[in-house]
Amino acid sequence: MTKQNIHQITLPTPYAVGDVHVYVVKGETVTLIDAGVNTKEAWDIFCDELKNIDLKPEDIDQVVLTHHHPDHIGFIGKLDHVNRVYGHELTQLWLTRDESYFEHYLNFFNKLYDQWGVPEQYQHIEKTVKQSFKFTTTSELTHVLTEGDKIPGLESFITLETPGHAESHLSFYNPETQALLAGDFLLKHISSNPLLEPPVKPGSERPKPLLHYRDSMRKVLDYQFSNIYPGHGEIFTGHEPLIKERLVKQEKRAHKVLDFIQKGPATPFEICQFLFPKHYQSQFGLTMSETVGQLDYLIDTGQITEVIDHGHSRFIANHAVTNN
Ligand SMILES: [Zn+2]
């Protein structure tokens, strides 16, 4: 097969994370990895940048999505000539704005936030979802990808399931060149937030994003990556020390949470306020997801227990504080 070239295109977003990168892989087939946000500014820059590599939007044969977040699926609906759209099956729910899923999504968060002691003024779930629709277009997956899948026209890459930041997260690895199209799985300058999501089936157990994220990171420790092409920040190498550092940092944060809980039972909201006193108000969804991630980790490692009384959760430490 012909040599593939990976072209990075950087686009603005209205989000705190700043710019997002999409990638155009030019081989026999032209593949776009991710689709920015749906703003005029991002689309205009995208079209201009395509010109620099002698392409027009109509030249894109297929789109591959790393995950369902709005800064990665935004203008896909503008590429309406494209009839091959690849991604994780959960991405479909967001592309089509599946009504029953979003009803379930809102119910799930409302119920959980009540249970976790979150005051009403922070329960902006509906607003957050509407906000994300504002910067995306609708579309549909034509092909679902799972672990190990190859994509026709992009055969040199294999699909790696890398859930955590999003349950729908996929990365794409080229064993020959050892390139990794990483989406938001691995970013050099910041650690990705493991974001809370409802279970796909109402009533079943919710996913544990931080545990999934740890598993995804550990899973790629043995891989050799030459270049990692991320959704945000610079292209980089050296994932092994980065992952090890992130795992340790997370364990330290969990320890801080454990210390707090050892002083007395606490609700997730109280723990969130303790962990992020400066940011919990302005970035409630992110900080709450991070907090719950630490709680999931401490439960998983047998250090705390969730006690639910009359529909309200408190977390208690399994062992008394040792005096040393
Ligand atoms: Zn992103």
Image (cartoon, rainbow, N blue to C red):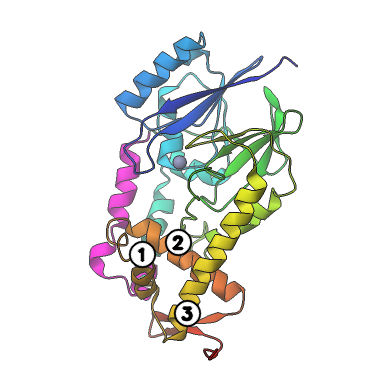
Viewer-closest of 56 and 303? 303
Label 2 or label 1, whichever lies nearer to me, is 1
The disc, 2 or 1, on the residue closer to the chain's N-terminal end is 1
- Give the SS element for disc 3: helix
**Amino acid type, callout 2:** Glu
* x then y, percent, for residue 139: 45, 32
Residue lying at 52% horizontally and 82% vertically, measured from the top left: 305
Q: Which residues are magenta?
A: 112-136
Q: Quadrant of ligand 1?
A: top left
Circles 2 and 1, Cβ within 8 Å, touching? The answer is: yes
Circles 2 and 3, Cβ within 8 Å, touching? The answer is: no
Can you identify the residue that label 2 sits on?
Answer: 290
**Amino acid type, callout 3:** Asp
On screen, residue 8 above or below 292: above
Can you identify the residue that label 3 sits on?
Answer: 259
On screen, residue 54 above or below 203: above
Left or right, 46 with reference to 207: left
Residue 207 shows up from this direction: no
Viewer-closest of 249 and 156? 249
Residue lying at 33% horizontally and 70% vertically, measured from the top left: 273
**Amino acid type, callout 1:** Phe
Quarter occupied by residue 291: bottom left
Magenta residue check for 130? yes
Can you tell which mark lies on residue 276?
1
How many other residues sit within 10 Å of disc 2, few (<14), some (14-19) or many (≥20)?
many
The disc, 2 or 3, on the residue closer to the chain's N-terminal end is 3
* x then y, percent, for residue 293: 50, 64
